[in-house]
Image (tube, rainbow, N blue to C red):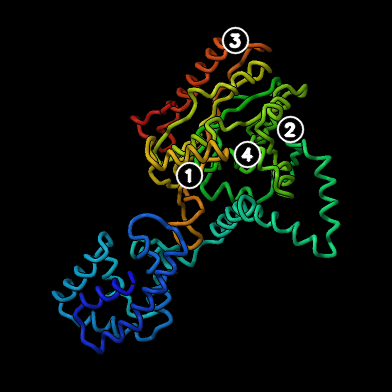
């Protein structure tokens, strides 16, 4: 067994006496096996992934096994030359894990009080995992809870709503299914008719905590008055398009004050409205479908001052969402230009600096086997499967939560479009070229303010 072999290598390399081997067996072996299970249970990725999981088992073993102090005492009483030899031998078994990590575990942690003090006072980085301190300020805890709230609505509630109807069928509340089905029959087209956003939902405090987690900031460069309707192009897509979600489905970043005469709707996949109750919650915040019918309801509405926000790059662009990269899928995306021309709506380019930095995605260059599989999956399922990692609730190294990186969302100048119900390809290409030019100029004008250096370029593909 791999874990057993690894354990034997560690024990043999230390060259310790039989009595101390028993102590080591009672602690290290228990920890290694527990950690191996943790590693298998969580796909944390990256080098030394299995050993990072073993560390968690090691922490458990430390707090549950009193004999651990014998190993520490043994190590601390050794001559300095012998200490260095042991550290180098153990390190050679696991590659790039630093010498300092082993010195911490074998030499510095003498008792549980010291361990707790380290965890309480500052983030502790051990064997590659950076653990969050325990005395985090209340505001930051509330911000993390707000992120968990959004991820519950994104992931967990979908599973719950698939199971709940089946469960209700076998209870005295079976009639609720038919009541909701009746409601759904009459409300089915609401995502295509502008939804029904309410200010109370958009003003909920949880959204402010969510925005402050990163933080997300909204920047205005020009006025958007209420004399026309708008088609807002949001770039880049990122892994989940969190900047567009925060800015346009809530008032957390002040969109209602910066643009008081414009009412925004954020376009999303039609499948997002197939989950009971979540669909209503989404529409109360201003989500609409991304179909032509849904967008045209906003753009051609007689009531002016409406804006449809469309994340242009879509699922394909999500596969290029790597920290420090600014690659957009835009060259052949011209359908939104045609919609703007047909309706006479003004185009508004926007860019979210930092959107690509809140997750780390595994390298997937075009032409690689992984990218080919992702492209195939996108064609078959309509969504891309990026392989990414963020941070966890109690650690800063791996998990599904986004990293705390600032996102600065810049709203550009509106581009007025002359209405034409039957635009030619040349007219569409001309307006598209102007849109791309305005977007690149927006990026260049603000890149050094929001985390990019002077040499960074926006790649349009």
Which of 20 and 4 lies nearest the eye of the viewer? 4
Mark 4 and mark 3 lie on one chain; the one further toward the N terminus is 4
Mark 3 and mark 1 lie on one chain; the one further toward the N terminus is 1
Mark 3 and mark 2 lie on one chain; the one further toward the N terminus is 2
Q: CA distance from mark 1 to mark 4?
A: 31 Å
- Which residue is identified by label 3? 424
Q: Secondary structure at mark 4?
A: loop
**Quadrant where the image shows the C terminus:** top left
- Which residue is identified by label 1? 386
x, y (%) of residue 112?
39, 79
Q: CA distance from mark 4 to mark 3?
A: 39 Å
**Quadrant where the image shows the N terminus:** bottom left
Dot label at residue 192: 2
Instruction: Give the mark toward the camera: 4 or 3.
Output: 3
Q: Secondary structure at mark 2?
A: helix
Q: Secondary structure at mark 1?
A: loop
- Which residue is identified by label 4? 254
């Amino acid at each position: 067994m791999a874990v057993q072999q690894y354990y034997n290598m560690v024990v043999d390399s230390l060259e310790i006496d039989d009595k101390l081997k028993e102590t080591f067996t009672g602690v290290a072996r228990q920890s290694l096996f527990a950690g191996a299970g943790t590693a298998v249970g969580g796909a944390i990725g990256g080098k030394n992934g299995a050993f990072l999981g073993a560390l968690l088992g090691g922490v458990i073993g430390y707090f549950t096994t009193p004999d651990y102090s014998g190993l520490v005492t043994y190590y601390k009483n050794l001559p300095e030359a012998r200490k260095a030899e042991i550290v180098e031998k153990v390190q050679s078994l696991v590659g790039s894990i630093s010498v300092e990590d082993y010195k911490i575990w074998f030499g510095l942690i003498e008792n549980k009080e010291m361990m707790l003090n380290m965890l309480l006072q500052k983030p502790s980085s051990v064997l590659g995992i950076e653990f969050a301190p325990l005395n985090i300020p209340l505001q930051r805890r509330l911000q993390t809870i707000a992120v968990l709230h959004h991820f519950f609505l994104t992931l967990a509630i979908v599973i719950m709503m698939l199971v709940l109807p089946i469960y209700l069928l076998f209870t005295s509340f079976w009639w609720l299914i038919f009541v909701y089905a009746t409601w759904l029959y009459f409300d089915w087209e609401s995502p295509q008719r502008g939804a029904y956003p309410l200010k109370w939902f958009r003003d909920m405090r949880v959204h402010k905590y969510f925005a402050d987690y990163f933080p997300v900031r909204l920047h205005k460069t020009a006025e958007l008055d209420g004399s026309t309707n708008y088609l807002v192009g949001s770039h880049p897509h990122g892994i989940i398009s969190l900047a567009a979600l925060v800015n346009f489905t809530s008032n957390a970043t002040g969109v209602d004050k910066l643009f008081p005469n414009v009412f925004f709707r954020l376009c999303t996949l039609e499948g997002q409205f197939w989950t009971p109750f979540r669909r209503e919650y989404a529409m109360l915040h201003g989500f609409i479908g991304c179909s032509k019918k849904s967008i045209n309801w906003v753009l051609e509405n007689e009531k002016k001052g409406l804006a449809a926000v469309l994340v242009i790059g879509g699922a394909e662009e999500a596969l290029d969402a790597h920290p420090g990269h600014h690659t957009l899928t835009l060259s052949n995306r011209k359908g939104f230009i045609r919609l703007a021309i047909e309706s006479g709506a003004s185009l508004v380019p926007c860019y979210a600096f930092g959107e690509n930095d809140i997750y780390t995605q595994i390298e997937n260059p075009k032409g690689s086997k992984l990218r080919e599989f992702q492209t195939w999956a996108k064609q078959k399922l309509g969504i891309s499967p990026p392989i990414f990692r963020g941070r966890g609730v109690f650690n800063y190294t791996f998990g599904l939560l986004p990293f705390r990186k600032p996102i600065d969302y810049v709203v550009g100048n509106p581009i007025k479009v002359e209405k034409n119900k039957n635009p030619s390809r040349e007219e569409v290409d001309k307006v598209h070229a102007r849109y791309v030019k305005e977007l690149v100029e927006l990026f260049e004008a603000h890149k050094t303010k929001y985390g990019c250096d002077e040499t960074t370029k926006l790649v349009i593909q």
